[in-house]
């Protein structure tokens, strides 16, 4: 993570702690966000490619259209998150909680879904890790 991204991450965390939730469209590529709480955050259309979000709190976050290719989401809480049209190709989702999440038109090609909780999740037009499409 470069110094500019590190400064942006620090700014996002400070703004979140001050009550802000709107981080739509931010470029957080390769950001280190492990264990960060961003519950209810609006991150739609954000660039989180190659970011480390392991054990992050993203419950009920809006990640519609977000770019999460190759992101590390191992053990992350995405309960009730919106992931419509998001790209999670190659992402590590081992042990992530996606219960009640909305995945419509989501790309999971090559993603690791080992021990993922998808209980009550909405899965429509999702490209699964093996390339099959769920209707």
Image: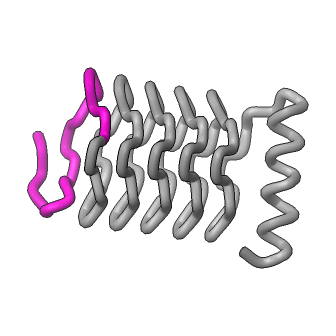
Task: In the rendered view, tell whether residue 17 sits above or below residue 26.
Answer: above
Count up the numbered dots. Answer: 0
Q: Is residue 129 left or right of residue 4?
A: left
Residue 119 is inside the magenta segment: yes
Residue plotted at (50% across, 53% down): 66
Please tell me in which quadrant of the rendered image residue 121 appears. Answer: top left
- Residue 123 rendering spot, x and y as whole percentages: 23, 35
Q: Nearer the viewer, residue 94 or 121?
A: 94
Quarter occupied by the N terminus: bottom right
Indicate the colouring scheme: one colour
Relative height, residue 89 to residue 66 (above, below): below
Magenta highlight range = 116-135
- The image quarter containing residue 5 is bottom right
Say whether residue 11 is left or right of residue 70.
Answer: right
- Is 35 magenta? The answer is no
Please determine whether, in this image, residue 81 is positioned above or below residue 75: above
Furthest residue toward bottom: 2
Q: Position of residue 104 (x, y in %)?
A: 29, 40
Location of residue 22 in the rendering, given as x and y in whole percent from the top left corner: 73, 38
Of residues 70 and 35, the one drawn nearer to the viewer in this rendering: 35
Please give left or right for residue 38 compared with residue 91 in the image. Answer: right
Residue beneath the point at 43% across and 65% down:
69
Quadrant holding the C terminus: top left
Q: Residue at x 39, y 59 (%)?
A: 92
- Secondary structure predominantly adopted by residues drawn in magenta: loop
> At x 39% / y 61%, what residue is drawn?
91
Query: Percent position (x, y) of residue 73?
Result: 48, 52
Eyeballing the image, is 6 above or below 40?
Answer: below
């Amino acid at each position: 993570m470069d110094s500019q991204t590190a400064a942006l991450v620090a700014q996002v965390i400070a703004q979140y702690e001050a009550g802000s939730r709107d981080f739509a469209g931010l470029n957080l590529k390769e950001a280190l966000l492990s264990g960060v709480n961003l519950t209810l955050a609006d991150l739609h259309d954000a660039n989180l490619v190659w970011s480390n979000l392991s054990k992050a709190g993203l419950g009920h976050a809006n990640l519609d259209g977000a770019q999460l290719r190759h992101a590390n989401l191992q053990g992350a809480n995405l309960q009730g998150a919106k992931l419509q049209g998001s790209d999670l190709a190659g992402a590590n989702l081992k042990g992530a909680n996606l219960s009640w999440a909305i995945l419509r038109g989501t790309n999971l090609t090559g993603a690791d879904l080992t021990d993922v909780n998808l209980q009550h999740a909405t899965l429509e037009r999702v490209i699964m890790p093996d390339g099959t499409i769920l209707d």
